[in-house]
Image (cartoon, helix red, strand yellow):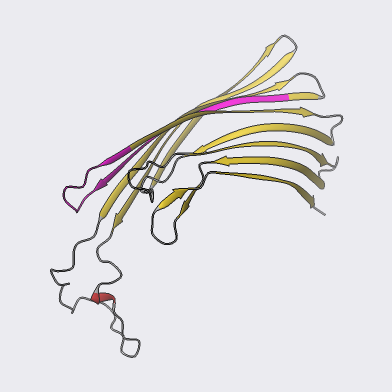
Amino acid sequence: HINFIDTSITDLFHTGPIDHRLLAGVTYGETIEDYNRIRGFKTPLLNINIYDPVIGYSDLPPPPASEPPLAHEWASAKQYGAYMTDLLTFTDHWKGVVGARYQDVKQLQEELRLPDTPNRSRDFNSAFPMGGLIYQPNREWSIYASYSSSFVPPSPTAQSVIPGQTLQAQTATQEEVGAKFTSSDQRLSATLSFFNIKEVNLIQEVGITGLYEQIGAVRSRGGEFELDYRP
């Protein structure tokens, strides 16, 4: 299950000719995963006769003692964060936004059934900035440039295919420029943007092994056009 809390405050103030709209907040979240693997796919209890299927297993004997018990993994991830963004109005035509976020993720994994299995804990933290500049020649048009970054830790139960290796958090940065148009009657809007995204420490599963590897970095570049009309 997932529990998440986000609380924030907003303040409006001025520094000389610049108007500020400051948003600041803190977050807390907890994710709990419980994987109780009672039987594997090779247990005789899962052999099904398609010509004479049996629904339910209450009338069958328990599995033989030679079949080893499987893992019962319990994992939690607690996330602590703080963020701040400031929307600055320089003139009627120029605006800007700056901000930053800090996140700390503490992960714990425990084995509840198999003996002599040590607990595993991992801690990830990072601060990532963002910013942008907007030029509005009139009420219909906006031209903008922005920069943002992100940070995504691996799942608490994710294990590396390389023994002893600790999976690192995925990070990404994005630069984007574009233009937006909104008609005076709000019925027509259009957006044209170009972006450059770089992702580092990407994590992917190795086949169907349930293990993961980090495949390095990926860069994505492209453009996007969106048109919306409401009659």
The residue at the point 25 percent across, 66 percent down is: 39
Q: Is residue 12 visible?
A: yes
The residue at the point 74 percent across, 32 percent down is: 145
Relative depth, front residue between 202 and 53:
202
x, y percent for residue 125 = 44, 30
Report the residue that reaches farthest toward the top: 16
Relative depth, front residue between 37 and 182:
37
Relative depth, front residue between 10 and 32:
32
- Magenta stretch, overall SS: strand
Report the residue that reaches farthest toward the left: 65
The residue at the point 78 percent across, 44 percent down is: 191
x, y percent for residue 6 = 48, 33
Number of marks present in the image shown: 0
Relative depth, front residue between 170 and 228:
170
Residue 73 appears left or right of 179: left
The residue at the point 43 percent across, 44 percent down is: 154
* Residue 169 versus residue 21 in the image, above or below: below
The stretch in magenta equals 96-121
Quadrant location of the C terminus in the rendered image: bottom right
In the image, residue 111 lies in the stretch drawn in magenta? yes
x, y percent for residue 3 = 40, 42
Q: Is residue 103 visible?
A: no
Report the residue that reaches farthest toward the bottom: 51
Residue 182 appears left or right of 14: right
* Residue 93 versus residue 228 in the image, above or below: above
Residue 188 appears left or right of 84: right
x, y percent for residue 25 = 51, 27
Q: Quadrant of residue 11?
A: top right
